[in-house]
Amino acid sequence: MNAHPEQPSPKTTSYVFPEPLREGVILARPNRFIMDVALDGKTVRCHCPVVTRIGNLDLTGRPCLVSDSHNPQRKLPCTVEAFSLDRPDAPQKHWIGMNQTASNRYVEHFLKQGTFSAITGPVSQVQREVKLGDSRLDFLINDQLYLEVKTPMVQIQTDIPAYVPRLPEKPFSSTDRVLRHLRELAASLEDHDRAVILYCLYYENFGFRYYHGTTYEKVMETVQACHDAGVELWQADFTMTPKDISLTRYHPLEEW
C-alpha cells in the first residue's frame, strides 16, 4: 500500500442510505442472481448484485445487510448490499460491501464533494456513462479525465476466518470487457489528458491485487502496457455500516 494514502477532508460527508439497511443471515444462493435471506423472522428471496463468485466462499450462514426498494414492480424488491465474515452473534460486525452496480453512485457522491481531489483536482463537471469506442465508461470529469470504476469481488482481499467454508476452485477467465476498457482508456489519452481506473474495496483489506485466474498472464500484459501508456491505477477504501458509506483513504497502486 502507498506509504502516504490520501485522506478525505474533514468536511467530507458520507453517502447515507435512504433508510438504514436491515441485518439478516444468508441461507442460500440458488443461482448467481439470487440469495435467500433470513430477515425479520422470514425467508426473503433477494437480488444478488454480484454475478461472479464472491471470494470463492460459501456464504451460507453469513450475516448480511439488505436494502428494500419498496418497489412492488420489481420481481425481487430487496437487494443484498453487504455481508460479514464475523459470526451472526458478533456484537459489532465488519461489513464487506458487494453492490457493484451501486459503486458508481457512491463514487459520484464523493467526486462531487471534491473528495478525490488528489486524482481529479478541482471538479467542475461530472458526466456519467460516457461513450468511448465500443464501451461506455463510468465518468468523464472536467471533459479531460476518464475515470472507470471497478469493484472486484472474485477475490476478497482480507483474512478469511477458518470457519467460513471455501468453494472448490474452478477456472476463472477475466472478461474481455475489462481488457477492452483498459485498451480504450489507453487510447483515450490521444485526445484527453488523463485516464484512471479506480478499484473500490468496501472493507478493510491488505491491498488490491489482480486475481490469479486462468488468464492472469494476459491480464497482466494488458495492464502493464496500458499503465506504461499513461493509464493511472488507483485504489479507494471505504467503510460500510447499515447507515452509510464513508471514504477512508485512497492511493495510487504501486503493485498489481
Image: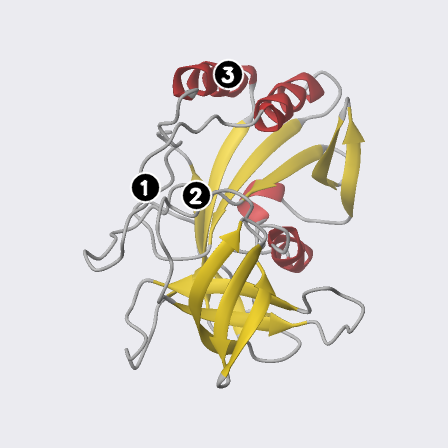
The tag earlier along the polypeptide, 1 or 2, is: 1
Query: Marks 3 and 2, Cα distance to the nearest angstrom?
Result: 21 Å
Q: Between tags 3 and 1, which lies in front? A: 3
| Mark count | 3
Query: In the rendered structure, which disc, 3 or 1, sits on the residue that comes first in sequence?
Result: 1
The mark found on residue 222 in the picture is 3
Q: Is residue 90 above or below residue 107?
A: below
Judge from the rendering whether residue 102 lies leftward or rightward of residue 1; answer left or right.
Answer: right
**Inter-mark Cα distance, 3 to 1:** 22 Å
- Residue at coordinates 49% horizontally, 21% vertically from top-left? 223
Q: Which residue is mark 2?
A: 251
Res 254 → quadrant: top left
Badge 3 amino acid: Thr
Residue 14 visible in the current orientation: no
- In the rendered image of this protein, does residue 21 appear above or below residue 32? below
In the image, which is nearer the foreground, mark 3 or mark 2? Answer: 3
Q: Amino acid at mark 2?
A: His
Question: For this rendering, which residue is in front, 95 or 175?
Answer: 175
**Numbered label attached to residue 1:** 1
Q: Circles 1 and 2: CB distance less than 8 Å? A: yes
* Residue 256 x %, y %: 38, 29
Taking depth in this image into account, of 40 and 204 the one nearest to the observer is 40
Task: Give residue 21's quadrant in the image.
Answer: bottom right
Give the residue at the far left of this rendering.
162
Question: In terms of depth relative to the viewer, which is nearer, 50 or 29?
Answer: 29
**Element class at badge 1:** loop
Can you tell which quarter of the image residue 209 is in?
top left
